[in-house]
Amino acid sequence: MSESFKEALKINGVDLEKNIELTTLLKALIDIEKIKAGEVFSVTASWLDGSANIFIQRPDQTIQKISGPEKMVTDLFSIWFGQPADAKLEDLKKTLLK
């Protein structure tokens, strides 16, 4: 999953070397990739007045908070609402925008 996110971010012009917060998010997703069937996780974001938070709820219900500039969330959402990295993301984008 983190590799797919990296690819989508790259296609949408996000420079991960300049976006430490998203790099932190991707590292957290590597740990989550070890989840078992039936477990779930969520990634949510909030932003206001130029600053933002991304919350990762892990399968064990612990929550990791990543704070940064509002652009961090815009960059993250480009995975789903920007230029799709592959056909499956294109299908997901169409479904989300219905």
Image: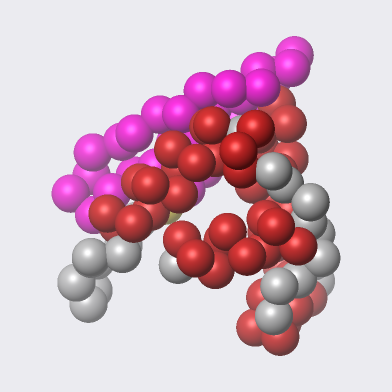
Q: Who's the residue at 54% across and 68% down the image?
A: 4
- On screen, residue 80 above or below 86: above
Drawn side of residue 61 relative to residue 1, left or right: left
The image quadrant where one finds the C terminus is bottom right
Q: Who's the residue at 65% across and 83% down the image?
A: 88
Q: Quadrant of residue 62?
A: top left
The residue closer to the viewer here, 48 or 32, is: 32
The residue closer to the viewer here, 50 or 97, is: 50
Magenta residues span 43-69
Most frequent secondary structure within the magenta stretch: strand
Q: Position of residue 68 (x, y in %)?
A: 58, 22
Q: Position of residue 74 (x, y in %)?
A: 73, 40
| Residue 42 visible somewhere in the drawing | yes
Q: Position of residue 25 (x, y in %)?
A: 45, 43
Q: Who's the residue at 65% across and 32% down the image?
A: 18
Colour convention of the picture: secondary structure
The image quadrant where one finds the N terminus is bottom left
| Residue 95 visible somewhere in the drawing | no
Decide whether residue 62 is among the magenta residues. yes
- On screen, residue 39 above or below 13: below
Instruction: Give the total number of marks visible in the rendering.
Output: 0
Decide whether residue 63 is among the magenta residues. yes
Q: Who's the residue at 23% across and 66% down the image?
A: 35
Q: Which residue sits furthest top?
A: 49
Q: Which residue sits furthest front?
A: 17
Drawn side of residue 56 relative to residue 10, left or right: left
Q: Quadrant of residue 24?
A: top left
Drawn side of residue 91 relative to residue 16, left or right: right
